[in-house]
Amino acid sequence: MTQITSPKKTRKHSGPSRLCADLLRRADQYGKLANRKRSSVSLYIMNDGKSLDAIASGSDLLTRQYERADAELTRLMAALAQAPAAGARASAMQVKPAPRKSLRPAKAKAARQAAKTKR
């Protein structure tokens, strides 16, 4: 007797979610104003040059990643808005991404102390 099985139901993303679409729109807007490619903007706000393209093709973000990217993009847009129009590209180059905080500060601190004691 032949057993009939139903095909697996998988949910395919047709595109980015509303929040991710808004992030992509703002990132593209910043790239246009600062005269940057999407990969450069992705590197600035997500520390990875391929992340925004992956989001555009349907990849998803964790909440913490979205919040970091949103905060960094807001900071970069504010710095660009304060720059004079003629030197927008030069001032956008001078704006560096904020340093990332360690997710495990206690372990990092313990590792630094252990390195000091080994010297």
Image (cartoon, grey):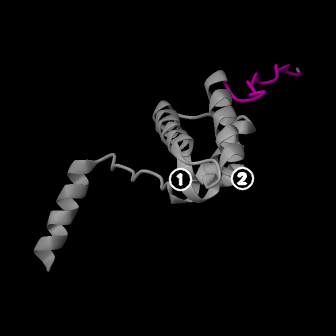
Determine the secondary structure under disc 2.
Answer: loop
Residue 47 circle label: 1
The numbered dot on residue 37 is 2
Relative to 32, is 111 above or below? below
Residue 64: name its quadrant: top left
Question: Who is closer to the viewer here, 14 or 93?
Answer: 93
Residue displayed at 75% across by 38% down: 57
Q: Earlier in the sequence, mark 2 or mark 1?
A: 2
Nearest the camera: 83 or 73?
83
Q: Give the percent coordinates (x, y) of residue 105.
A: 25, 49
Q: In this view, does 45 lie to the left or right of 15?
A: left
Give the amino acid at mark 1.
Asn
Residue nearest the viewer, comparing 3 with 67: 67
Q: Which residue is drawn at 65% across and 53% down?
A: 86
Q: What stretch is highlighted in magenta?
A: 2-17
Q: What element carries label 1?
A: loop
- Say above or below: 2 vs 57: above
Image marks 2 and 1: residues in contact by CB distance under 8 Å: no
Quarter of the view holding residue 80: top right
